[in-house]
Amino acid sequence: MRSSKSLFPQVLMLALTIACLFERALAQPNEYKLERNVIYGTGIVNVSTQPLERDLYLDAYIPKGAEADENPRPAILLAFGGAFHRGERGDFQFSEDGASDSSMADYCAALARRGFACFSIDYRLVPDDPALPSDLDNSKLMPKALLKNPAITSRIEFVRQKMGLPSLDENSREQLWNGTFAAIQDMETALNFIRANAQEFHVAPNKIAVGGFSAGAITAINLAYGKQADVQAVVALSGTSWGYDLNKTVSKDAPPILMFAGQWDLPGIRLGSASIAQLFQSHSAPLKQAWVPGFGHFYPMEAPSLAAQFDQQSVIDRLVSFLTETLRVTPN
């Protein structure tokens, strides 16, 4: 007999899929402007063999009417997940244990329909063999030796096996280390590009949030709280702490964060999220948390989420409420 844990996500996923398809059917194609394949910068890849620069891309989702609106729109930059090994910025979904997540394209379309400009970014992955940024302050980083701890790398090994890659060795551990910080560098490059082109994108340069799913959420956390970039909010969909040692960088002046985790999420996500929450609370830094009942690491944006005081909202509705509050706007 199949356990209720394995059956519940599948039943709920079916209902949510039907609801999502219905919403998409009602959505009008002119609700937002989609600009694909915008080059926001370059990054060095193949660093251990034949280094070269490759273009980095984003897709921009701009709300309908933004061009004619006198008030620039608030914005959020999102990065996909995939254990720093896989994933895409477009309509790409993961499925596991009978559940699927929503792609960054799904999130961006939903946010643009609600009045937020949204940017789904590409970034360098471990198989790209990216270069390590030269401006790292090693005193603020976690020890690289943690990559030899199986408890830290178990999910990475799982993903590598699914991709047909060999287990981590000294070379691929170095690539993973480099990839962690290359991703941060790429997100910061995208952030700077969006700010530099704020007028063209019709966004408010002082009302920009960053976020993502899994590895993308880790990258957003690292950028905002490790490198302390100028962002106004962070959304972490099943993120955790890895790369920067947040104990050395988080302060009470940190931008607010909204963290999600599935009820049966990965142990590293649940433990890491709890550690981040405890750290923020100890510094009186602004924090909101929600969990997604009935799901593991992958959950759709229409799934219900529960938070303090037993309030219930879908993941996307809670995300919109958080952005509306923290960016101090009322989207259309």
Image (cartoon, helix red, strand yellow):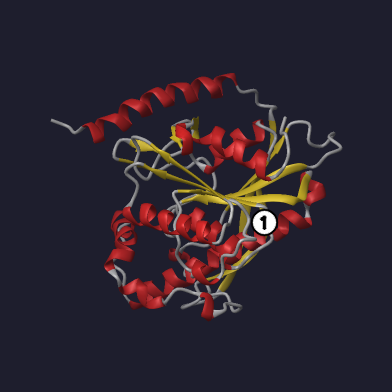
Query: Viewed as shown, does residue 264 lie left or right of 331?
Result: left
**The C terminus appears in which quarter of the rendering?**
top right
Q: Secondary structure at mark 1?
A: loop
Q: Can residue 244 be seen by looking at this rendering?
A: no
Q: Position of residue 254 (x, y in %)?
A: 62, 59
Residue 192 falls in image quadrant? bottom right
Query: Viewed as shown, does residue 210 lie left or right of 294?
Result: right
Graded by Cα atoms within 10 Å as few (under 14), some (14 to 19) or many (20 or more), the crowding at tag 1 reads many
10 lies above or below 297? above
Towards the viewer: 68 or 146: 146
Q: Residue at x 52, y 58 (%)?
A: 280
Residue type of the residue flagged with mark 1: Val
Q: Residue at x 71, y 33 (%)?
A: 331
325 lies above or below 121? above
Question: Would you name the residue on which mark 1 appears?
Answer: 231
Q: Position of residue 18 (x, y in %)?
A: 43, 21
